[in-house]
Amino acid sequence: MTTTQTFGVDGMTCGHCVSAVTSELSALPGVHDVAIQLTVGGSSTVSVVSDAPLTDAAVSEAVVEAGYAVTPRRSLL
């Protein structure tokens, strides 16, 4: 069974940015697919399909390694 997680990434502006984040996330164990909807000047939507849920720390570390930042999660009241 696979799981899909979606989160935001700030700072991406072009195809090279997308490639860098995709490469780092794809290198995480169990990741099958990474899809990114680029939003220049905002938070891009990143979806990751993997064997099991990834930890926030693993995702954040991979995104930071690529040179970007994960958008903080906001809770709705």
Image: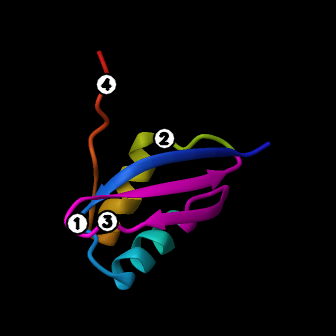
Q: Nearer the viewer, mark 3 or mark 1?
A: 3
Could you tell me which secondary element the residue under label 3 belongs to? loop
Q: Nearer the viewer, mark 3 or mark 4?
A: 3
Label whose residue precedes the other's in the sequence (2 or 4): 2
Q: What residue would you read off at disc 2?
A: 55
Structural distance between the alpha carbons of marks 1 and 4: 22 Å
Check if residue 39 falls in the magenta segment. yes
Hey, what amino acid is under mark 3?
A: Thr
Q: What residue would you read off at disc 3?
A: 39
Hey, what amino acid is under mark 1?
A: Gly
Which percent across, then down, holds residue 47?
52, 55
- Which residue appears at 40% of the width and 77% of the height? 20
Label whose residue precedes the other's in the sequence (3 or 2): 3
Give the image quarter of residue 31: bottom right
Asked whether the viewer can see residue 34, the reply is yes
Asked whether the viewer can see residue 27, the reply is no
Structural distance between the alpha carbons of marks 1 and 2: 21 Å
Hey, what amino acid is under mark 2?
A: Thr
Above/below status of 76 relative to 15: above
Could you tell me which secondary element the residue under label 2 belongs to? loop
Label of residue 11 in the image: 1
Q: Are marks 1 and 4 in contact (CB under 8 Å)?
A: no
Label whose residue precedes the other's in the sequence (3 or 1): 1
Q: Are marks 2 and 4 in contact (CB under 8 Å)?
A: no
Q: Residue furthest bottom?
A: 16
